[in-house]
Image (spheres, rainbow, N blue to C red):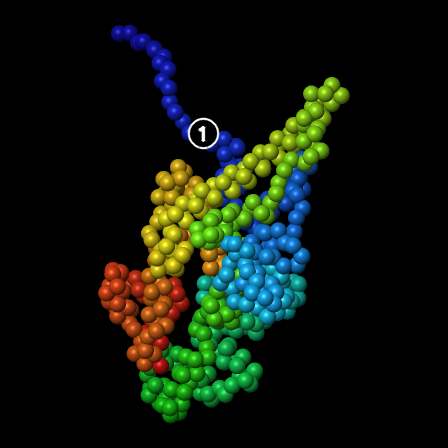
Amino acid sequence: MSIELNQHLQPQLQVRVTPKQIAANSILAMSSVELTEAIAAELEENPALDMLEQSNCPICGSAITGSHCTECLPKGAAGSGPAEVPDGGPTDWSAREDADELDPIARAEAEFTLTEHLTWTLHALLPTRLHPVADYAIGALDDSGFLTDRDEEIAAATGVTVDDVAAVREAMRGIEPIGVGSRNIAESLLAQIAYLREAGEMEIPAAVEAVVRDHLNDLGERRFGLIASALGITTDEVVEAWEFVKVNLHPYPTSAFTAAVGSSGSSRSIVRPDVLIRVVDGELRVEVVESRRFSLRVDPTYARLSAGMRSAEASEADRQHVREFVGRARFFIDNVNRRRATLQRIAECLVERQQEYLLHGVQHLVPLTRAEVGAVIGMHESTVSRATAEKYVMLPTGEVVPFGHFFTASLGVKDQIRKMIEAEDVAHPLSDQEIADRLAGEGVAIARRTVAKYRDELQLLPARLRRR
């Protein structure tokens, strides 16, 4: 018996991720705010990196001449005559009479997300030691504005007493949107009733608190007689309370915040778009906003030093210093430029595939996946996903939406459901099955439970609670 040992060389391909690719992917995945912070940090740490100073609009990134952004001015607002918005400017904003509102800086300062609004207000109302408790409570709010953690849990997590948490919740209940921080719908409605009663601006039915506090489920089921018997009041008084709740109160605190912002339904959020899509000369054009916000370059002094490094007068330590920081600056600038180019290619593909949506509204949104976009532009699906995460697009209407809107085909169906409910007979509201049947008649095959899911996501009540 013999044993032979042989060696064979077999070529094998392996994918290795280089540090350069990791850094590039990291910058690609950054949101607009994170990129701004990364650039600020790099400018502070790297003397060879320089950014040209210019005054930019915080909304669209355009250079500002004077105090107003000409790109963001609504049509006819720049003067007394029929002024025109520059080509490609948003034209869907309503005219504003107050000149301060034309200032993009003033607009930015006037716009808050719900989190920012609550944080700013609670920090102003509460002592400094309770600010971390307020921040924790704000972070524990669900999408409807209800507080999901118990007082004991918040106290344990923040190292304070339950009474401290109660003080924070009490302060939260007194600020808009009234009812935010409540545990459930009944508590939210009661907070709103108390606020309206204290304001004294309208007549509050005497029985409404008792009806909401003790018989909310029965009220939803329209068991008016049962409620009247239990409370010792007339059925008419119960109906009066029901009408008051329907007309004046919001079951979900966040819907009250959105309604307070404006009838358009747009949330008061300072979301800066990463990409602008505009109609210029009848065609849709794409522009990545980074090209306006950030003008990075290698510092001229370091560029000259780098060019003269072969001089015998330069020491090895000097050469090493310049090479290190100039190389790092060029590497950073290259990654930012790659991010910009990737966003440009993705946005141009979306414009081509979703042109009808951009020109005619959400009903024309077609099904599209990130994998399909990647196949068109020659990128992997994960790269497209990374590039579009937490980034926003300004549509030709001036509306700012997440990139994810282009990949959410259900938006059109949700819009149809919303319009059907808005147009329904309030005495005979549409059930989820009736909505599904109507959608089927319009060529949209959808199950009743899917209608219920979309309705809940739109924060619209079921038919039995919409009946007046």
Question: Which residue sits at x=62%, y=40%?
Answer: 296
Q: Is residue 317 above or below residue 142?
A: above
Q: Secondary structure at mark 1?
A: loop
Q: Amino acid at mark 1?
A: Arg
- Residue 361 to residue 293: above or below: below
Residue in the picture at 42% in, 52% down: 404
Q: Is residue 162 visible?
A: no
Q: Quadrant of the C terminus?
A: bottom left
* Residue, disc 1: 16
Quarter of the rendering containing residue 294: top right
**Residue 163 lies in quadrant:** bottom right
In the shown orientation, is residue 222 left or right of residue 253? Answer: left
Figure quadrant of residue 70: bottom right
Q: Residue furthest right?
A: 313
x and y percent of residue 136 in the render? Answer: 55, 60
**Residue 273 location in percent, x, y?**
52, 53
Q: Is residue 421 left or right of residue 332?
A: left
Classify mark 1: residues with Cα within 10 Å, few (<14), some (14-19) or many (20+): few
Front position in the image: 365 or 203: 365
Q: Residue at 54% of width from left, 68% of height from top? A: 95
For image coordinates 67% across by 27% down, the residue present is: 306
Quadrant for the N terminus in the image: top left
Q: How many marks?
A: 1
Looking at the image, residue 307 sits to the left or right of residue 23; the answer is: right
Residue 82 or residue 466, whichever sits in front = 82
Q: Is residue 402 left or right of residue 133?
A: left
Give x and y (percent) for residue 26: 52, 41
Depth check: give the residue in front, 397 or 376: 397
In the image, 8 versus 418, the foreground residue is: 418
Pick out the residue farthest to the top.
2
Q: Is residue 211 above or below residue 297?
A: below
